[in-house]
Amino acid sequence: MTVARVTEIIASSPSSFEEAVKQGIARATKTLKQVQGAWVQDQKVVVTNGAVSEFRVTLKVTFVLEE
């Protein structure tokens, strides 16, 4: 029997939502073993002086627990 867990990660990038997702997954896989997938729960931008300065994503990352 396989048991999985979902954890929430918030990641950011100055360039794009896609880059924020990639950075979040890269960081998650350094700590979590057997990452199986993720979905973007939320997207947000930070505006500084009238321009987008940061892209943020909230990810739900799924990983399989070791036996």
Image (spheres, rainbow, N blue to C red):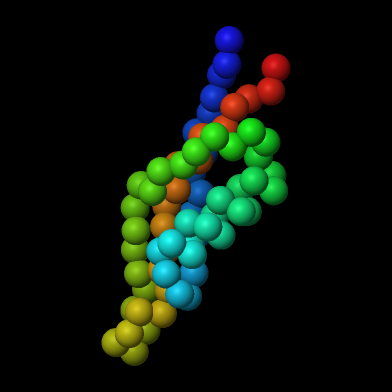
Q: Position of residue 46 (x, y in %)?
A: 37, 73
**Which residue is most to the top?**
1
**Which residue is most to the left?**
50
- In this rendering, would 47 be left or right of 61? left
**Which residue is most to the bottom?**
49
* x 61%, y 54%: residue: 26
Q: Quadrant of residue 3?
A: top right
* x 70%, y 17%: residue: 67
* x 34%, y 58%: residue: 43
Q: How many marks?
A: 0
Q: Quadrant of residue 2?
A: top right
Q: Position of residue 32 (x, y in %)?
A: 65, 40
- In this rendering, would 31 be left or right of 37? right
Rendered view: 4 above or below 40: above
Rendered view: 24 above or below 15: above
Rendered view: 1 above or below 45: above
- In this rendering, would 65 be left or right of 6? right
In which quadrant of the rendered image does the N terminus lie?
top right
Q: Position of residue 62 (x, y in %)?
A: 51, 35
Q: Quadrant of residue 56?
A: bottom left
Q: Position of residue 20 (x, y in %)?
A: 48, 62
